[in-house]
Every structure is written in structure tokens, then in C-alpha cells.
Amino acid sequence: MARQHFLVVAYPGQGHINPARALAARLARATGAHVTLSAAVSAHRRMFPSLAAPDEEVHDAGADGGGGISYVPYSDGYDEGFRLFAGDGEAAWRHAETFGRVGREAFAGVVDRLAARGRPATCVVYAFLMWWAADVARERGIPRVLYWIQPATMLAVYYHYLHGLEDLVTEHAGEPEFTVAMAPGLPPMAIRDLPSFFTDLGDTRLAAAFHGVRTTIEQLDIDRRSSSKPPMVLVNTVEELELDVLAASFPDLDILPIGPAATSLDGGAAAAARASRDLYKHDEKGYMEWLDAKPAGSVVYVSFGSMSVVSRRQKEELRRGLAATARPYLWVVRSDDRDDGDGDLHAGDGGMVVEWCDQVRVLSHGAVGCFVTHCGWNSTLEAVACGAPMVAVPQWSDQDTNARLVAGWGVGVRAATGADRVVEAGELARCVETVMADTEAAAAVRRSSAAWKAKVREAVAEGGSSDRNLKAFLDRIANVA
Ligand code: UDP
């Protein structure tokens, strides 16, 4: 096989960088190829805070277990970062426009610089929302593949929504129980289980954010029209988890499920080194030692990911609900999501509150018996891979659909929330008991979680579905290049 140079390009959010980095590491390990990861300057600076020049390229030789990864940032016009929920709809549209224009140009510069140095990219892997990277690659004749970092179910839902179902779904957006046959291979889906972009029509920030999804899917259409071969899509899922939709929903795409892309599932020093490059600084409290001292399956782990804004009222309900279970808990409250007085969140009731942790290590710890999660796809898949039963409290984007998958696999329950998405203390405690208590129903959830964990581990092992699909991708790319 001619020496490849994979250029993986990702949006500057933790939930985007994590699967991109995991895939980059796997490509480097599997092929010894050059792998470059390009993330926006705002993320690059946070990953590498002590560079002499803040936007300097970094070559990370050993930490990813292969030939290493080069990090070459692009500017998207928001070098200090952008927070969707900190502003209004106008700010969100401004961001979408700038991101599309400035990011595209800067990324074209990255591609051309690599070529001028004699190391041209031979394959551009454009992750979710990085639609213009496909354009840039197409203009230069570089093979490209979409890296879908949400479940295949979500790709099917978006794809079919944008190919004929938009009007119907919009017409019924206010009817949570109305069901729609969204895609072949999927049972009819209730409006409440569809992404909030379709249903929360009053929030113009969501319309701006959805623009990136729409334009990403459009890239597949452009490639489909211009080539006799179906466009290739790598999906961060596990074939066994989504067999029906994978088999039925994508006749005109070449779909390869290669997940789970969790950076530290393999454990060890390389994993720890990667986690230390998160966009958030790890809390120095000894949370792993704290977990070590807890009985097996006794701890409730709570996190709402890297983007969600958890309201003060929600925090108070969580605190009371957790206290009501009388179970020890480890709760992530990010430094950028703290209100005055949050220092008291864990006062004297057996919990530990941290600003950020190594989530996969936490989920892998035997003391963790339940994960209260917003159901971001990375968190969801990490929990499945670690066998941690979930209490789903979805907030926005794909999370309602992910919560439905969790319930469908029998690996957790979805908490009831009000229109403001707040789960109340009593409901939280009830859900936690539903997966942790000494009852037959809870034991069944734990058994399903353990069974799926085993299947996912098989998928990534040599000869498993994920491993085979990655090899199939490498073969296809070798034949295109
Ligand atoms: N994460 C982490 N430490 C934390 C909280 C989250 O490492 O304290 C990681 C988590 O493992 C996951 C990512 O951050 O890989 C969050 O991605 P997800 O898709 O779950 O949600 P998002 O942040 O995109 O809403």
C-alpha cells in the first residue's frame, strides 16, 4: 500500500475532538501512515497550553501508540472559542457564516501547506459539521470520507428528513407523541425522540447550529452526483448495536461502522497522556482514589458533557435527588458552568464534585454503578462500552434520539422532565434506583449493560466488526489513491 497521509479535520468541541483523536490514533497504529489532526485554533490552544507560539504545530510522536499524530490548527475566526448558548440567534448565525468562510479558507491553507512541504494529504477525513473540508478536498482531487460521530440512527434520521420528510416533521413539531416513519430499518419515531433542531423551532440558535448539519449531509449528495461510487462514511458506532438501520437505511452510501472511538478504552499510559490533552483541565482532586475506596457498583456518576448549560434549578434538583438516594456520587460541574454558591453542592452528603475528569477511566471503574448523563453520543457509547447503566436526561441536539436508543438496548432508563428539560429530585432518585436497586428490574438493566459491553469489546478486538470495517476502509482508500 502506498504511504497514506490521513488528514482528519474536526470541529473545536470536546465531543468532536475526542472521536477524531481516537480515530487518528487508530489509523496511525493500524497503518503506520502519517496522520494529521486539524482542529480550530481555539481547541488547539487549550489542548497545548504551553507552546511558545500559541498556534504552533505539534508533532506528538509516541502518545498515540503508532507513528504519531501531527496537530495543525486552522482558524475559524473564533480563536477565543464560541459558545452557542452564551449568545442569541444573531450571534449563532454570525458564527455559522464566519465559520464557513474563514474556516474554509484557513483549512485550504493547511492542505496546501502540507502539499508544499512534500507531504500532501492523500485522504481527508471530515468529521461532522466540517462540510467545507469536503469542498476543499474535492477542489484538489483528494479522496474524502465523512466521519459521522453520532449513531447511524441519527444519520438516517437527518438524511431522510432532508430528503423528503422536513415538511411533515415541521408540521407536527408541536405534537410530542405523533409518530413518523423516519427511515427504513427504524421503527416509527415519536416527535419527542427526534433531534431538538426539528422540534424546538422557537430557538433561532438551533436553526443556525442545524445549518452545519444540513451542509454536512449536502456534501454526500454532491459526491453522490459526481461519482459512480457511493460516498464513504465512517460511523462512530458498533454494527451490532444498530444492525437494522445500517442494513436498510443507506442504499446509496458506503457506510462503515468503526466505533467505539473512545480514546482511553485501551487504558495505560498512552491513554492517560491523551486524556491530559482535553480542552478542560482535569480536576486535581483524587477522584480515582476516592472511587477505589467505594464498594463495587455503589457510585452514581453524573455529567452533562462539555457544552450543556445546567441551570441553577437543575443543579439544586440533582443535589437533592442524589442526596435522596443516599448513594455516593461523583458529579462533574465544569468551571464554565458554575453559578455563585455551587461550592456547596456536595456539602456533607457523601458526594464529590469535580470540574472535569477522565470520563472513560471513571466509567471503567468497578465502583461506578450508574451514569446520569445528558446522552451526548460519546458519553452514551462510552457508557455502553464500559457496561455502565444509564439514567438519560437528554437536553438538545441528538440527545433525545440517543436516549431512545439507550432505553431500546435495555441499558438504562430515560428520566421524565418538564418542558424546561429539568429533571426533578424525586424523578432522578426513582430512575437511579430503577437501575441500581436490589430488584429484578434493575438486575435486568445491569445484565443488558454487561452483555453489550462484551459485544462492543468483541467488535473492536482483532477480527471483530469494527476492526474488519476499519480494514475495509483502508483497502478502499488504497484503491482510490
Ligand atoms: N468528558 C470527560 N470528562 C468529563 C466530562 C466529559 O472526559 O468530566 C468527555 C466524555 O468522555 C466525552 C466528551 O467529553 O467523550 C463529551 O462528549 P459527548 O458527545 O458525550 O457530549 P458533548 O460534550 O458533545 O455534549
Image: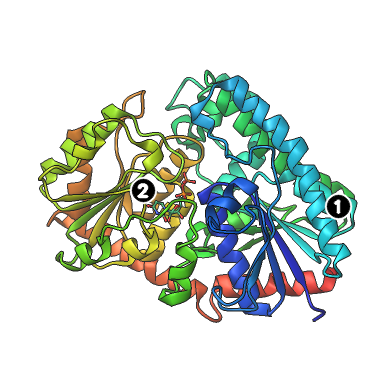
Extreme residue in the front direction: 52
Q: The N terminus appears in which quarter of the rendering?
A: bottom right
Q: Is residue 350 above or below residue 308?
A: below
Residue 223 in sight here: no
The amino acid at mark 2 is Ala
Q: Amino acid at mark 1?
A: Arg
* Closer to the eye: label 2 or 1: 1
Q: Is residue 426 left or right of residue 221?
A: left
The residue drawn where x is 68% and y is 79% is: 31
Asked if residue 372 lies left or right of residue 5, the reply is: left
In depth, the one of 177 and 139 nearer the eye is 139
**Residue corresponding to mark 1:** 138
Q: How many neighbours does mark 2 have within 10 angstroms: few (below 14), some (14-19), or many (20 or more)?
A: some
Residue 216 in the figure: left or right of residue 398: right
- The reply to whether callout 2 and callout 1 are in contact (CB within 8 Å) is no
Label 2 SS: helix
Q: In the figure, is residue 20 to the left or right of 452?
A: right
The residue that appears at 37% across and 43% down in the rendered structure is: 334
Could you tell me which residue is drawn at 82 percent across and 45 percent down?
222
Mark 2 or 1 closer to N-term? 1
Question: Dividing the picture into quarters, in which one does residue 256 lie?
Answer: bottom right
- Give the camera-side residue of 74 and 195: 74
Image color mode: rainbow
At horizontal 57% and vertical 39% (from top left) the residue drawn is 81
> Where does label 2 land, which residue?
407
Residue 275's place in the image compared with 105, above or below, is below
Label 2, label 1: how many angstroms apart (C-alpha)? 40 Å
Residue 213 in the image, given as x and y percentages of width and height: 65, 39
Q: Is residue 476 visible?
A: yes
